[in-house]
């Protein structure tokens, strides 16, 4: 059978396999793509494509890799049929027509990819990351070259050799392979083709960053969190690696369902010892509007004690993060105009940090990135009442539903979330449902994400608990093993549950970005374990309703806290 449009006398059309990938170390952050064209019959490498893209998102990089791979295949034989293999479920499902393309940055790129070959000539197949190593390493080579201020060179590439494929059958594409931009313009993946010839310049919206990533006058960090790798102005992007994450069952989980009153204090929210806010054991208002304590590029690696690739969908995508929190890379605001210059400078430093190879192995691969969303407000939240898994199971209030809509809009603009998992409680399932409807995803329920059971304290304020059960409360504040009155769940038990849940989810979502919709105690526990911080650190964290945090988990066991308590999307 010949392909549509082929000369019947020319014999059967050739069949190619295109493997493509893209990544962004920061999401958005320093990004690149890789693509390889293989002979479907022999498996020989016929052409390779790779390019550093500057500061864009992981999804943009993936689509750019797809376009470059298709163009390289077309240069080899415009009448060929192509089987595309990618580990991006998002791209495969969208290009196959099974998922809608809602993100404004993805639509023109998908259209560009669809125009390379006539309809019906290209099929799409999802593959695990382990089977996409060639394109993955090309993308990483391109990002590494960009970090050095260089252009990716085919002459120095070892991606083909590293993946065990023979280089003997390579055919240069002669500089004809080009990656399409979102506007349909072409950037030279002649840097992508085996010849390595330079290509046309990209539009300024996606700058080509030489030695140091170029950031516009306004910071590239959007107003809303870029969960996996957002770079916040409050973080030090040059932070040293952190301690290894602790899996101890004795970890003190965290707080209850909202910013607590005060650690060992009353329900007014007065500061506790060392100025820390209280034990978030109760529902509280959305305080600290968006203070960021640990953000994207300045991620602190735990585990192996080494700062490795940072960024969503690492390995080309330090996948991390990616898909829940990164979008178009368009400039945003992290503060008033008087601080924008300082914020932009921080973003430059952060981008430089995540673009550097670090001390970890360069082929560690993409982390599993958890974007942690605390549910929206319930009627109990403004009253600062204990609301765990053993109480009335309240639904969202009108204010909580509005918060969930704002979160959904923010995450939709970034287009990086690949899956959604929620606690079984009503407020989290409702929040997750609102986000899922906007993103076109299903919601899986995970019991391990539920809030702590506060026993007889459910529905009471912190002050009421102290008045009625002073001894039990003091014991609970002093020891992670102490249970709330009436046989509730201790922080140690919550910590063990969350650690087990984390391990399950990391295995299930390796290399992907997943939104976890949960509560104060579990979310703070994820962060505490990632940092290897002591149990009392939980009393020094403020977690607002509908806030976003993010943690990435690497193959070596290390963890990177990339975002904490971001509420900028609610302003």
Image (spheres, rainbow, N blue to C red):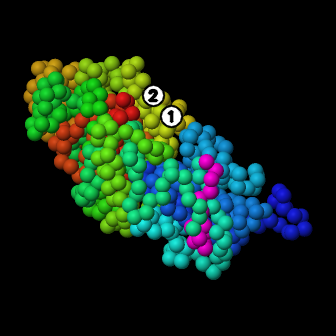
Task: Depth check: give the residue in front, 389 or 15.
Answer: 15
In the picture shown, does residue 554 fall above or below 110? below
> In this rendering, would 483 be left or right of 81?
left
Residue at screen point 18% across, 48% down: 534
How crowded pointer 2 is (Cα within 10 Å; few <14, some 14-19, many 20+) is rated as: many
In space, the residues marked 2 and 1 are separated at their CA atoms by: 10 Å
Residue at screen point 40% across, 27% down: 403
Circle 1 is placed at which residue position? 436
| Callout in the foreground (2, 1) | 2
Is residue 114 at all visible to an observer of this figure? yes
First to last magenta residue range: 183-197
- Indicate the quadrant containing the C terminus: top left, top right, bottom left or bottom right: top left
Residue 199, x across and y down, in percent: 59, 64
Task: Depth check: give the residue in front, 461 or 367.
Answer: 367
- Indicate the quadrant containing the N terminus: top left, top right, bottom left or bottom right: bottom right
Task: Depth check: give the residue in front, 526 or 456.
Answer: 526
Residue 196: in magenta span: yes
Circle 2 is placed at which residue position? 405
Residue 189, x across and y down, in percent: 59, 64
């Amino acid at each position: 059978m010949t392909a549509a449009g082929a000369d019947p006398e020319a014999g059967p059309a050739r069949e190619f396999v295109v493997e493509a990938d893209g990544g962004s170390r920061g999401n958005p952050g320093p990004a690149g793509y890789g693509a390889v064209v293989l002979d479907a019959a022999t498996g020989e490498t016929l052409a390779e494509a790779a390019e550093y893209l500057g500061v864009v998102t992981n999804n943009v990089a993936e689509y750019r890799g797809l376009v470059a791979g298709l163009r390289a295949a077309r240069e080899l034989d415009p009448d060929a049929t192509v089987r595309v293999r990618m580990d991006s479920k998002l791209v495969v499902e969208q290009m196959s027509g099974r998922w809608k393309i809602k993100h404004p940055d993805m639509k023109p790129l998908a259209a560009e990819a669809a125009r390379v070959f006539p309809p019906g000539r290209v099929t799409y197949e999802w593959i695990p990351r382990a089977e996409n190593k060639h394109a993955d390493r090309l993308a990483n080579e391109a990002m590494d070259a960009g970090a050095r201020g260089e252009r990716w060179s085919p002459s120095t590439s070892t991606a083909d050799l590293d993946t065990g494929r023979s280089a003997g059958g390579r055919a240069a594409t002669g500089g004809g392979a080009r990656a399409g931009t979102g506007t349909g313009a072409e950037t030279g993946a002649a840097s992508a083709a085996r010849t390595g010839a330079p290509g046309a310049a990209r539009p300024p919206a996606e700058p080509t960053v030489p030695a140091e990533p170029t950031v516009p006058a306004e910071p590239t960090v959007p107003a809303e969190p870029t969960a996996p790798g957002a770079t916040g102005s409050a973080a030090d992007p040059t932070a040293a690696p952190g301690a290894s994450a602790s899996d101890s069952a004795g970890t003190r989980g965290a707080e209850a369902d909202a910013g607590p009153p005060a650690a060992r204090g009353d329900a007014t929210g007065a500061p506790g010892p060392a100025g820390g806010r209280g034990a978030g054991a109760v529902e509280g208002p959305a305080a600290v509007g968006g203070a960021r304590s640990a953000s994207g590029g300045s991620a602190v690696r735990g585990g192996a004690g080494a700062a490795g690739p940072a960024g969503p969908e690492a390995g080309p995508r330090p996948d991390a993060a990616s898909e829940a929190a990164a979008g178009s890379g368009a400039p945003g605001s992290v503060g008033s105009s008087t601080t924008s210059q300082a914020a932009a400078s921080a973003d430059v430093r952060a981008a430089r940090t995540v673009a550097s190879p670090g001390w970890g192995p360069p082929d560690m691969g993409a982390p599993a990135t958890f974007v942690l969303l605390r549910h929206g407000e319930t009627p109990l939240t403004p009253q600062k009442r204990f609301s765990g898994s053993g109480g009335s199971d309240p639904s969202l209030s009108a204010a909580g539903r509005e918060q969930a809509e704002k979160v959904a809009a923010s995450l939709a603009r970034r287009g990086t979330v690949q899956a959604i998992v929620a606690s079984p409680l009503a407020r989290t399932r409702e929040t997750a449902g609102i986000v899922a409807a906007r993103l076109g995803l299903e919601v899986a329920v995970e019991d391990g994400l539920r809030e702590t059971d506060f026993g007889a304290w459910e529905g009471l304020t912190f002050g009421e608990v102290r008045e009625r059960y002073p001894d039990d409360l003091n014991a609970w504040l002093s020891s992670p093993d102490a249970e709330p009155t009436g046989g509730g769940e201790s922080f140690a038990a919550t910590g063990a549950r969350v650690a087990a849940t984390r391990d399950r989810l990391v295995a299930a979502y390796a290399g992907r970005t997943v939104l976890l919709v949960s509560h104060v105690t579990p979310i703070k526990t994820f962060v505490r374990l990632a940092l290897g911080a002591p149990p009392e650190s939980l009393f020094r964290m403020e977690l607002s309703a509908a806030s976003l945090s993010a943690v990435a988990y690497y193959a070596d066991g290390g963890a990177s806290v990339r975002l904490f308590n971001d509420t900028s999307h609610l302003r």
